[in-house]
Amino acid sequence: MQKLLAGRSIPCWIWHSDRGGRDRLTLSVRFHLDKKTSGLSCRFALTGQAVVSLDGQRIAEIQELAAHTAAFTLVDGFPSELDAGTHTLTFDIVATRQVPIVEVNGYLAGRTLGFSAYIEGEGFWLSSDESWTSDDNVPATVVARLGEEPFGDLEDGPEWFVAGGFGDIVAKPIHEVTIGQYANSEAQQESPGIVRITGEVIGSEPLVQPQRNDLNLFYHLRKQAEWKEVRTMQQARDWSNDPVIRITLPKEENARMKVVNQGTEAINLLWNGAESIHEMDAYDGCISEWFTLEAGATFITLPQGYRHIQLIVFSEQACSFDLLVSFEAVGVDLERVGAVASDLPIMDQIYDVSAHTSLICHQIGLWDGVKRDRLNWTFDYYLAAKSGYFVWNDYAVLKRAVSEVGEGTPRGYWMNGIPEYTMWWICTLWDYYYHTGDRSFILEMKEPLQRQVEWIKENIDPETGWMRGLEGALIEWVPISQGDAELGVHAVLRQTANRLRMLADEIPELEQGELWTVPDIPAERFLQSEALAVVLHGIESGYVGEEDARRFLLGYELKDPFTPLSAFSLAEAYSAFGMKDKAWNVIETVWGKMLDLDATTFWEGVKLELPDDYHDALTTYKAYDSYRMSLCHAWSSTPIKWISENVLGVRIAEPGCRSVVFEPYAPQGATRCSGSVNTPYGPVRVEWKKREDGSLESLIEAPEQINVIRMEMAR
């Protein structure tokens, strides 16, 4: 029985312990009121239809609507006042449809059905959790936290629900915004970050809200379909006589917008959000939503990824309007430990934009980006984590992303439906342990790890080591032949085996036993590949020996097509073979290219040669029929790792950061640098300056638990 609590909890998605195996059930909760309570209401979200009863009396019937999974809906018939005493609320539920599960979201198989609710009143709060009971008086099972896939954020909840189901997300005011073009209205900065918009509307027909008829694979697929529907209606109408205002945030954010109607009439507001002006003007993947705002009311949008905003004010009747518009950045409130400051501005800017890209992708999970989707993709967070270890003091978001996919993916399925994504998950476990020394979390993953290792073994020919059924291989986000993809997968397979052996040596309790056989592949096959990523995987895995690797790297010139992930791998390969000048040239060229195009977060893809409308040139990598290329992608935050390990010169030498090698490097144009690197024991601080003879005078301060191995200072 749940009683009044001093704090208010955010409702969970709950169900029977059978989860998707039970489509008929009763969920109920007993609650006690110490006194007669008024101002009561109950809101719910649900897969299925339901009969609602209070103290044994039927009070409402709920239809089975897909829309009920997207918003908290008021229970009509719930009394606004109840007497003191113990009460019982019951939902008798029947679900005829479940959230669809395919390979990419297979780890969500336990979340195909769900129920979430809360009751509030004067001095009273109750929300769905494990204190509710399902059939046979068995405690309900939490199937998802608020904000998690497949349901995502829900509309019509209290403003403070922004904290999310784990309670660690914050909303911070954005104090600097820029007012761009505006027509048929007046717009001015009322105070820092608050824009006042006034004017007249002439009166026009309302738009139609998109119908939510389907249960979607995940939140952003639903949102993208709705945006496209609104965008189509928007483009079919002439807005030349309506008030139109554009606002730009200082950086791309996962942001929510707050609009206060100070006028005396209700108005409608259509808003678009985009990562770039190109997207705003030309692509139907642009965020497109509209809502009605009554006089004196406030509306707050759900957080989405954007930098540029367009507002169109309209109403059915001619009237004047007076609006206050402000924005908040939404994400996990991480403490930034890593930093760099030098007299090479391009390097500092690359580091800082990488850190911002990483930060705003820390949400309910470690998302690949804040605009496109919210699934936990193992390759994306494997790469995103590479920067996170050096810059943030907390890995909770990474850990819940790792555990969600690991525990949720059953044996017999590849993570995210892609063979090597299972391998990248295993590699993430090694990287996490190598940086943190956190044995307890790795041991929590023991069963999922054993399960996935056995599945890999089942798909390998024990005689040859070659894998079977690699039609879904995905090595790089650019066009690549099936033969090259298969080569890349086997290189990743070998890398994974190497890391798994090291992990098992460090933590024998994992009981890994014999690993798989890897195939014998000659170096020439990798070196003949047209795909940069495949060659680099061949080098990193050891299929390509040192002499051949040096020859390739010395003769290679970066060229399209590639993505930031293969560009980073190239920089890492150069550094591993002592070619740090070449490595820095890659970082400066690729990430500098994005900065030249006004990037405030780093992208999913990039080309050295790009037209003005670079979206089309980038989306052709995967032949998207609409704009989906992410301009905020956590896998592109990796320069933090390179700068920390090479320019600051702090490289881990033992798992758990028990010792580090100190060997700073000065890129061309840099004569001084200082900064810090996060470790499990606290920050390592570095400072160096270049002497006249080109050598470096350096200082390092490390926590006493870390043994520092000083190397000869690089120029």
Image: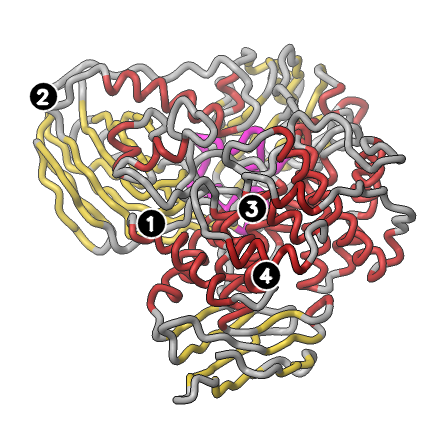
Counting residues from the start of the chain, the first of labels 2 and 3 encountered is 2
* Residue receiving disc 1: 599
The crowding category of the residue bearing disc 3, from other C-alpha atoms within 10 Å (few below 14, some 14 to 19, many at least 20), is many
- Please tell me which residue is depicted at 81% across the width and 31% down the height of the picture: 459
**Disc 1 residue type (three-letter):** Ala
Q: Secondary structure at mark 1?
A: loop
Distance from Cα at disc 3 to Cα at disc 4: 13 Å
Name the front one of labels 2 and 3: 3
* Residue receiving disc 2: 202
Counting residues from the start of the chain, the first of labels 2 and 4 encountered is 2
Locate residue 90 relative to residue 609 in the image: left or right: right
Quarter-wise, where is residue 466 in the image? top right
Q: How is the image coloured?
A: secondary structure
Distance from Cα at disc 4 to Cα at disc 1: 23 Å
- Please tell me which residue is depicted at 67% across the width and 83% down the height of the picture: 704
Locate residue 622 relative to residue 427 in the image: left or right: left
Name the front one of labels 4 and 1: 1
Q: Which residues are magenta?
A: 143-168
* Residue receiving disc 4: 389
Counting residues from the start of the chain, the first of labels 2 and 1 encountered is 2
**Disc 4 residue type (three-letter):** Tyr
